[in-house]
Amino acid sequence: MPGSPFAPAEFAELPPVEGVRLAACEAGIRYEGRKDLMLAIFAAETVVGGVFTRSRTASAPVEWCREHLAQGRARALVVNSGNANAFTGMKGMNAVRATAKAAAAAAGCDAKEVFLASTGVIGEALEPVKFTGKLDELAQTVSEIAWVDAARAIMTTDTYPKLVTRKVQIDGQDITVNGIAKGSGMIAPDMATMLAFIFTDAPLTPGVAQALCEAGVADTFNAITVDGDTSTSDTVLLFATGAASARGVSEISDTSDARGAILGQAVEQVMRDLAHQVVRDGEGLSKFVAITVEGAENEKAARQIGFSIANSPLVKTAFAGEDPNWGRIVMAVGKAGEKADRDKLAIWFGDIRVAYRGEVDPDYVEDRASAYMKGAEIDVRVDVGVGDASSTVWTCDMTSEYISINADYRS
Amino acid sequence: MPGSPFAPAEFAELPPVEGVRLAACEAGIRYEGRKDLMLAIFAAETVVGGVFTRSRTASAPVEWCREHLAQGRARALVVNSGNANAFTGMKGMNAVRATAKAAAAAAGCDAKEVFLASTGVIGEALEPVKFTGKLDELAQTVSEIAWVDAARAIMTTDTYPKLVTRKVQIDGQDITVNGIAKGSGMIAPDMATMLAFIFTDAPLTPGVAQALCEAGVADTFNAITVDGDTSTSDTVLLFATGAASARGVSEISDTSDARGAILGQAVEQVMRDLAHQVVRDGEGLSKFVAITVEGAENEKAARQIGFSIANSPLVKTAFAGEDPNWGRIVMAVGKAGEKADRDKLAIWFGDIRVAYRGEVDPDYVEDRASAYMKGAEIDVRVDVGVGDASSTVWTCDMTSEYISINADYRS
């Protein structure tokens, strides 16, 4: 499979996050000759927040994480690629329990402090015996600088590993926020998944970790779409080790704490960067597209209209064809089911206003718009003319390559 | 553009519907060398019912029809292809008024008894002066047997005209129901539209015509999807001339009248046949797919889950790849947002049960399912295990050809 045109040329190792150690290895779950299993071990005081797929057919690992998130404590994270352990009935939950037990033994913690995610083929039993033996080995080799390895081990059809870091100052101390993610369309082998793991050394209560995770996701991971499809396994977890408290940073125990806002901003930046990286690795894509809807009745309506545009096959194929086809944008606004004033509608491609007050802009010159559409990054702005709310979503185009990847995989 | 593999080899003329006369001509609106304008003239007592796009950016002709539907009377129908007269501001409504006026003069009726539909490129002003002169000529040449001509004149990217007829007996008399339609994906030139017109000689009150139209659409035109996109111009109109009353058929004035049920069944059959023809002409399609969802909480939920499956790019590309990829069906059930019991879920491709009780069927043999997927018509059945309601939707696969048609049209 050809790589994304947006793939970075190289991947710098991330700085350590005090209290987080990681390792990855080849467990041979499905892929040959690459790492497919990662273990992270966390300091004793680590808290966790999480957000999961809204799918009604969620996978066994998602069920496990949801159940144990309530206690808010985490000591280990195990992620495998190659098998999603989804739609595997009772066997699926048994595999999860066996994995958590083995990881707990390796990390020296309780099974319910182990968080899990699996991504890859669905409907095939995951045989944990294949890799539970590897967990001890991984626990021996964990280090503070195995981020690239970890990011690679969780890839499925991703064409590059996704990782990012930010630093902020809290109580005069450097606080690190690292993130790794995988995604690339909800696909292959049979279906992929969006997974993201955020790590920080800030001292948080479980409630603040959960609040920052939920707030961060809203305008980042929840504002992207490759093909509108939703995995059974989508998982975002935020781990906060609290290691910075040894350097005099006191615990952030309230979301109204200004330090929480500073950290929250860094968490959101990390999540947004990862979310964009996921879109930029969308299957077969040639363009990265930002769609901003303004003048909507409320933010939810703006988001809904944005996704209606971003998920429309006709809009996505027009981007692939470098066609400034604003008629399809009008169509997608209309079908979103949210309030829009047809006769006040305005549309911009970049700075070029193509439609204004419900008609083609009198000054519109198609050649200019066509030239703009040849770029690799496209900004679309739509004013729907009924209110003040706005929202931005990010997506990619839909090319013949997307069809090839998804139609020809098993044939 | 290659034709659909489902295109009929030939098109028989439909029988007359007493009280309906039609003609079509070349008005040169956009296409060269083909008819692009049709006029139907109706007997004096003709009533009309209609259903329109739910788009919030509906076209001027749709607004006109909605406004005049309340009176329930129709004497003429004008349809042009090549220009949708959508997103054309005040000019759009002026074009509609000019067309209605010209048609009224030609047909000898009031402008508000003229119904209109336009399909084709959007955002370009429709110059009615181009074809209002043709309406007189058309009014001179209308005949009872110009159905194929009319069906051809309303085509945009359709690769074949769509028409069908049914006969039923009411009060011992033959009643005819004819229908013509166009569609083929919500596309090209810039965006197409689903238009369908049903004609019968049964004597109905306007209220019954409206009720039959709404009831007929529910499980036919509202149960199909090519790409999930919705036009600004979708229009279904049912015209009932009442001409059969001269043969002793008394007026059907109440929906509880058993004769209304008989006629309603014929109307629904005509609509279902046309709806299937629209899907079978979906852009670039290679397969016609029926998706039945059973065991749902209620019919609306079953429909919603069916559309979630039918509109999923991953499911549609799997069909194109002849891949019995039931994992993607599970994903689409999960993302529909309706109640489903993962651990009771069952999936069939044709008669082959691939998943049962939330796991792959123990007797599943992929070779059998793969062989089944090679057929041109695919039946998918899903039991979501929470109730007794069911619903069927129809769709087609998504091929590279779909991308080519929609991405490469203007580039």
Image (cartoon, coloured by chain):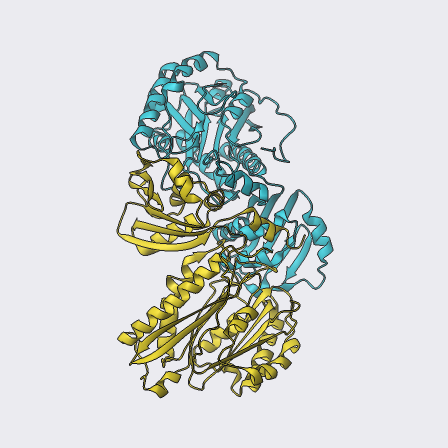
Chain colours: A cyan, B yellow
Percent x, y for residue B374? 45, 44
Residue B52 as seen in the image, left or right of residue B338: right
Name the one closer to the observer, B241 or B85: B241
Percent x, y for residue A336? 49, 56
How many labels sit on residues?
Answer: 0
In the depicted structure, whether residue A169 falls above or below residue A225: above
Q: Is residue B379 visible?
A: yes
In the depicted structure, whether residue B86 falls above or below residue A35: below
Residue A351 as seen in the image, left or right of residue B97: right
Percent x, y for residue B352? 34, 42
Q: Quadrant of residue B347?
A: top left
Residue sitting at the far front? B9
Locate the N terminus of chain A by quadrant. top right
Q: Quadrant of residue B410?
A: bottom right
In the depicted structure, whether residue B119 falls above or below residue A113: below
Kindly identify the residue that appears in the image at 60 percent across and 71 percent down. B36
Name the one closer to the observer, A21 or B1: B1
Percent x, y for residue B349? 37, 44
Q: Is residue B72 visible?
A: no
